Amino acid sequence: MLMISPRMASAMQEKQYTPSLLSFFIYNPTFGPREGEEEKKILFYHPSDIEKNEKIRNVGLCEAIVQFTRTFCPTKPAKSLHTQKNRQFFFEPEDNFWIVMVVRNPMIEKPNKDGKPPTIEYQEEEILDTVYGAVVRQCYSMYKLFNGTFGRAMEAGGVELLTQKLEKFFYRYLQTLHLQSCDLLDVFGGISFFPLDKMTYLKIQSFVNRVEESLSLIKYTAFLYNDQLIWSGLEQDDMRILYKYLTTSLFPRHSEPELAGRDSPLRPEVAGNLLHYGRFLTGPTNLKDPEAKFRFPKIFVTAEDGYEELHLIVYKAMSAAACFMISASVELTRDFCEQLDGLVGPQLTLLASDICEQFTINRRISGPEKEPQFKFIYFNHMNLAEKSTIHMRKTASVCLTSVHPDLMKILGDINCDFARVDEDEEIIVKAMTDYWVVGKKSDQRELYVILNQKNANLIEVNGMSPPPDDE
């Protein structure tokens, strides 16, 4: 028979609440300068059912905070405001356009005796400014990827068009924000690269060159396998945000059982067989459907004269995905899509099989994987390469890590310390749970290692932290 002490019983009744989104709004203080016109400043407000005067009051408070902090440092306006119950984040992506995100602090609800209301304890220090400040910047970057800048909408149709675009985009996007899953990887916003041998990499490069030569409309190409990047013709910052969209939104919506390697039924006869596993993830779901629509999402990427608008075609065969970008001024037809399907489908199917087979051989040669003594996160600021053995799965809605949240918080704290200095630095922390946490910053690279060595000393820990292979 299991006995539970009163202390354990009360602890079990405690409720823990993770960070959550309280409000998110965008305003421009120049749009309602006179008294009585304050509502004109508000371009978007979530949740929309908030009473008008409360919206005006909240926006006015943010204006006052920004103006007040500017008296101390005109070139660096406020980035966040800490209170007991919540944290506010401010971001000015374009002149006079402000994005504000208000996050409720995590809290613990403790029951009281005698029927009294429960006691609420807010954990004010559990939220990191760097993490949630990065989330606000990601919100703007994702909007800009699909809509261009706020200024572009203003030029095209004034405030009315801008508010329409903001409503349409953020109504959906904010539903995908899962703030409890945010951590150090959101600060980096990096790209996970797929490790390949040189011969297979050359096959992919040859494939990209052949497709771009045969279909001259294609301006840029990106190639991914297992949600990891292998090849990209885009600028780094554009690829960074497109990669986030693909891996956290588009690919999870189209996940399917994969066929790969030598088990593929096409392998023996693929050279003379036009059948394949290729399909469009954006655009027509079925080319044979006479009612099929040939519309593709449009994205905006950096160009010499500012930005350019492109059709985004994402085409997948098994675990391989190719992204083709074509000028938005071109009208894409059924003939073009059929031509792309016939050309890319068989080649991409064969490539996916080759990559999987090669990867399986390499793993077999390297022998069985042993449980490592350490787990790490690595990031290279120069090429945005990111690698984590701490994260078992990381998407917009799910973050499965193999370490305790307290250790993730320590990693975030070390990253904040690194951000304050330009020099190379090393920090070693002994956690209360007998874990050692090591952070190293050197030559635009950052490495964070968690060691489970109960009796290790500082000298031993310093000698055990591994430099991962650079991507």
Image (spheres, rainbow, N blue to C red):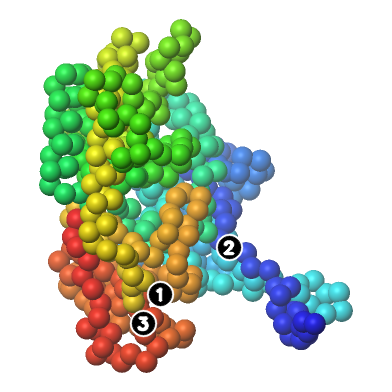
State the residue position of label 3: 436
Q: Is residue 355 left or right of residue 25?
A: left
Q: Give the x, y percent position of residue 328.
A: 29, 20
Circle 1 — which element? Answer: helix
> Around disc 3, counting alpha carbons within 10 Å, would you say few (fewer than 14), some (14 to 19), or many (20 or more)?
many
Q: Is residue 457 above or below residue 334?
A: below
Q: Is residue 371 above or below residue 178?
A: below
Single out the residue that lies furthest toward the front: 268
Mark positioned earlier in the residue sequence (3 or 2) = 2
Can you say which quadrant of the picture contains the N terminus? bottom right
State the residue position of label 2: 18
Q: Is residue 236 above or below residue 333?
A: below
The residue positioned 46% from the left and 30% from the top of the image is 165
Cα gap from disc 1 to disc 3, whole angstroms: 10 Å
State the residue position of label 1: 410
> Around disc 2, counting alpha carbons within 10 Å, would you say few (fewer than 14), some (14 to 19), or many (20 or more)?
some
Can you say which quadrant of the picture contains the C terminus? bottom left
Q: Give the x, y percent position of residue 205.
A: 15, 36
